[in-house]
Amino acid sequence: MMYRRALVRAALALPLALASIAASAQAFPTKPIRWVVPYAAGGPADVIARALQPKMAEFLGQPVVIDNRPGGNANIGHDMVSKAAPDGYTILYVVPNIVTNPLTYKNMVDPLKDLAPVARITSQAYILVANPNFPAKNVAEMIDVARKQGVNCASGGGLPGFGCMWFKSHSKADFTHVLYKGNTLAMNDLIAGQINVVIDLFNTAMPQVRAGKVKPLALTGSKRGMPLPDLPVIAETIPGFVLEGWHGVMITPGTPAPIVDRINQALRFALADPAVAKRITDSSIDVAPTSPAEFAAILREDQAKYTRITQDAGIKPE
């Protein structure tokens, strides 16, 4: 009898709880929202966040305050938001290192456990470029060179570094990943002939491609496209080899879904503004908003992909 009464009380309480959550979401926000950007002011993430900020504030009816918290491979900011109150008033700017950090470093925030997805906001491929004197003209020939004499594949870190490791694990050829502290340093050494190939961002590589100082071999996206629509993608030679970066927003786990959806709507509203979109696409980055569920699927897929790459490369968290 007591168990039955408890069930009845729970059944009666549920609609009230749901109504309370709905009312809270409808009123949200009633105060400024803090947007933690775990990178220095003036960097790519900060620039995009500040481009979105005014339109998000317009949609939400409250200020959106950028809080730059660089350091710790972005884990300082990641950790801060993972421990914030789950009320929607603290959100986090993320890039793929939210997925790759736990694969290479210990004591990092786990994106699938310690945070919740709000939206992917952008997507971008990378470009594989070579020194003009490098004998290969495409990916297949590059792998052949690696098997015969070895290839130095350089990056400024991040996903491009995983791309270099992926070439090695796929082909079993002699690829050596050379990690630089920044894309510009890698590009300078490529031009000087000290390394063979670089996987790079378009905004760093394309001026050198146009000047004839480096030659493009392939794009890393899922299909051909701008800024070199006739250039093959790596997946045409190595099926499944897709390396796409993104920027997104996450939040503290347990934040009510209606509040998460409202923040998602604010991001979409901002991205739909032509002036905001142009500031993003001028850097060869695509505007690519998703739902929370779609972003969750991207995070799971990326975690599985990069876990496999690090395991094949014998890399363990340090």
Image (cartoon, grey):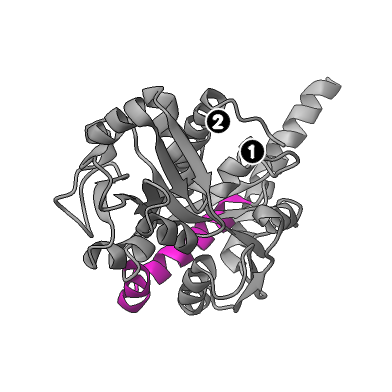
Q: Residue furthest top?
A: 1
In the figure, residue 23 lies in which quadrant? bottom right
Residue 12 visible in the current orientation: yes
Verify whether residue 279 appears in magenta.
Answer: yes
Q: Which residues are magenta?
A: 256-281
Residue 246 sits above or below residue 263 on the image = above
Q: Are marks 2 and 1 in contact (CB under 8 Å)?
A: yes
| Left or right: 187, with 88 as reference point | left
State the image coordinates of residue 181 (x, y, percent, origin top left).
57, 57
Comparing 108 with 187, the one in front is 187
| Left or right: 157, with 236 as reference point | right
What kind of element bears circle 1? helix
- Residue drawn at x 37%, y 46% is 196
**Mark earlier in primary sequence (2, 1):** 1
Amino acid under disc 2: Thr
Which quadrant, please, contains the N terminus?
top right
In the figure, residue 29 lies in which quadrant? bottom right
Amino acid under disc 1: Thr
State the image coordinates of residue 97 (x, y, percent, origin top left).
57, 48
Residue identified by numbered label 1: 104
Comparing 239 with 272, the one in front is 239
| Residue 310, numbered label | 2
